[in-house]
Image (spheres, rainbow, N blue to C red):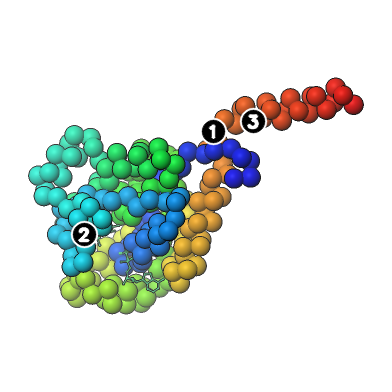
Amino acid sequence: MTTGLPARPAPLVLAAPSGTGKTTIAHALVEGSVDFVFSISVTTRPARKGERDGVDYEFVGRETFLRLAEGGELVEWAEVHGNLYGTRRRVVEEARDRGKHPVLDIDVQGARQIKERIPEAVLVFVFPPSGEVLRSRLTRRGTEDPAEVRRRLQTAHREMEEVVRFDYIVVNETLESAVARVREIVTSEGHRVSRMLGLEGEVARIRDDIERILADA
Ligand code: ADP
Ligand code: 5GP
């Protein structure tokens, strides 16, 4: 940071219609980075082939999920495509305490709750280049059958309207450019005056310097 002032890391929320590529972007950001940590969500959705409990998601039963929600342990939660998904408050706070940005790969309902509860969070809406590209990414991922792909496209049609509630848009054309744009956003946000810790002391230090120079001249 050019000011040399520390800023408390903000949660980075990546939301987008399913199939746009937010999970891919989130993992690319986190991989080999000391600044970002993936926020592992709790879900009642059954694990897909290749998904690992405690790595991709924390897979739980509906009863456990509702107990966590009622106990106030989730900073946000929502029902998406018939399953419950939520973010543990502890996961977000621990990352921030360790000086890292928690990266939340969540839906638009969850993003809205995060902004209400953590106003300093940075909300990025990942934009598909076109409806056709979205359809093709959803189909090629091969994790949903054609009926489910159609259902997700219907949800996407509705979710696109939510973009106005976000702070930034990043079009996921190529993965490299999308990841670079997200990094730029986080870097710029780190320079926000409102995020600076110890700003008053730093201002006083420079003013003292100037006063000494003026007195000596
Ligand atoms: P989401 O998390 O938004 O549902 P995923 O990250 O699972 O989406 O991505 C959906 C599919 O699109 C995956 O098969 C992924 O490999 C592919 N994908 C993601 N980003 C890109 C990109 N920039 N270019 C081409 N394919 C992509
Ligand atoms: P999938 O089942 O494809 O992994 O995820 C379906 C949707 O749920 C995606 O839009 C994903 O971002 C969202 N999601 C994943 N984790 C969470 C979470 O913790 N909270 C909310 N609100 N949505 C989530």
Residue at point 40%, 68% (across, down) = 128
Please give the label number shown on residue 202.
3
Q: Nearer the viewer, residue 77 or 176?
A: 176
Asked if labels 3 and 2 touch by Cβ distance under 8 angstroms, the answer is: no
The residue under label 1 is: 197
Ligand 2 quarter of the rendering: bottom left
Percent coordinates x, y for residue 53 in the rendering: 19, 55
Q: Amino acid at mark 1?
A: Leu
Q: Is residue 57 toward the left or the right of residue 8 in the image?
A: left
Which residue is located at x 44 percent, y 69 percent? 175
The quadrant of the picture occupied by the C terminus is top right
Circle nearer the N terminus (1, 2): 2
Tell which of 213 and 71 is nearer to you.
Answer: 213
Q: Secondary structure at mark 2?
A: loop
Mark closer to the chain start, 3 or 1: 1
Q: Secondary structure at mark 3?
A: helix
- Give the residue pinned by disc 2: 52
Q: Mark 2: which amino acid?
A: Arg
Tell me how far mark 1 sits from mark 2, CA to CA. 38 Å
Residue 124 falls in image quadrant: bottom left
Question: At x 63% / y 41%, what residue is drawn?
Answer: 3
Q: Quadrant of the N terminus?
A: top right
Residue 73 placement: quadrant: top left
| N-term mark: 2 or 3 | 2
